[in-house]
Amino acid sequence: MPPLNQTMEKRVASVNTNLVGLTRDSLRETLVGRGTDPTKVAMRVSQVWHWIYQQGVRDFNLMTNLSRDYRRELRASCEIKVPDLVKRQISQDGTRKYLFRLQDGREIETVYIPDDDRGTVCVSSQVGCTLNCSFCHTGTQRLVRNLSAGEIVGQVLATRDDLDEWPKKGQKSGTPRLLSNIVLMGMGEPLYNFDNVRDAMKIVMDGEGISLSRRRVTLSTAGVVPKIRRAGEEIGCRLAISLHATTDEIRDQLVPINRKWNLATLFTELRDYPRLSNSERITFEYVMLDGVNDSDEDARRLVKWIEGIPAKVNLIPFNFWPQSPYRRSTPERIQRFASILLKSGYASPVRTPRGEDIMAACGQLKSECQPRLKTQR
Ligand code: SAH
């Protein structure tokens, strides 16, 4: 019998490296490690990226501008893998909810939302979430783990697969896009998985990667204050804050991370963000909960908080989920709240719930992977 570590080495050697989600630097290292000529590696990185992110190719054999031998070498030690689509639901309004299975069997949800002028994919950054926001369904699910950069970018690639949006033979890439925007508003807190989210978004925004303008990428956070500055400096996409309350007392209940970083701390940090990232306005998300955070005083306090920040407010009618203790504010209340904001100069569109009939709306995502995994064991 061979010694144990030798068997292990063999096994490790037989696992191919997934190239999806590798930064330019890691891909360069990987390719040089697989025998690529270092003087040619920059060009190889561009070529491989082009095939993966702009052409949707998953098979090295189709990378026709690489020599046959080189393709064979890559195939022997690398792979191009995206999460497996396990289930797809399509709402009456066209919203699509995907359940993806990851390589370790965990499951995540991703949502695609078509609009007249754009198509947005809402990606997850973690399996589950640790924040425990009391009105959010995902928060009732235990965190299992962070997603890798490959699993984050992989959701975008797999969504393009489903939309059949890869250039056809002879067609140029980059023409009208069904998938034009990305929001990090699925399961998880993106700033608790900073490095992987950053690496994934770099690929999304790179002209040789998925090539979306940074104005079309929005990262939403519940307010992980120490990471906001880095998000501005190192990612530079648009920022959304899940605000949801105007007093610490209420926000402590709704978004418990507020007990760590309260409203005053959060807003001090936010005043720097647009300058740091050279970005457009910050979006404040505000869920409308009947009798909890929807009074006229709340609207006026909200205006005070955001004064001086280039901002817009998104009012989100609460999306119900079973066992939730909250109810949605009435349409009249939401209108009245919006009109107070408008008087102070803040346009505050009321977000139309999308995909409610398939539990795909904000805060409704919750994969059922845990019980299922338990029964598998
Ligand atoms: N953790 C990040 C990313 C999740 S984004 C964050 O908190 O920003 C998901 C958005 O949907 C957040 O603004 C969240 O507060 C909101 N949301 C959660 N549950 C909701 C519900 N039941 N109805 C409406 N919006 C909800």
Image (cartoon, grey):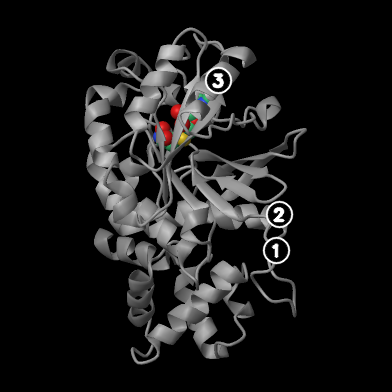
Q: Which of marks 3 and 2 is in front?
A: 3
Query: Closer to the N terminus: mark 1 or mark 3?
Result: 1
Mark 1: secondary structure: loop
Q: Is residue 14 above or below residue 68?
A: above
| Horizontal relation, residue 166 to residue 6: left or right | right
Q: Position of residue 110 (x, y in %)?
A: 57, 42
Identify the residue at image location x=37%, y=68%. 13
Left/right of residue 279 with respect to residue 316 in the rendered view: left
Q: How busy is the neighbourhood of tag 2: few (under 14 within 10 Å), some, or many (20 plus)?
A: few
- Residue carrying label 2: 163
Quarter of the figure with the N terminus: bottom left
Q: Where is residue 284 in the image (x, y as percent from the top left)?
A: 43, 34
Dot 3 amino acid type: Phe
Which of pointers 1 and 2 lies earlier in the amino acid sequence? 2
Residue located 70% across and 61% down the image: 165
Q: Distance between the residues labelled 1 and 2?
A: 13 Å
Q: Classify residue 355 as left or right of residue 264.
A: right
Q: Is residue 124 above or below residue 7?
A: above
Q: Does the residue labelled 3 lie within 8 Å of ligand 1?
A: yes
Q: Can residue 137 be seen in this view?
A: no
- Expressed as whole percent of the image width and height from the top left, the position of residue 255 reads 36, 23
Query: Which residue is disc 3 drawn over?
Result: 318
Q: Give whichever of 294, 260 is nearer the camera.
A: 294
Amino acid found under the numbered disc labelled 2: Leu
* Badge 3 or badge 2: first in the primary sequence: 2
The amino acid sitting under disc 1 is Pro
| Location of residue 251 (image quadrant) | top left
For the question of whether residue 263 can be seen, the reply is yes
Residue 176, numbered circle: 1
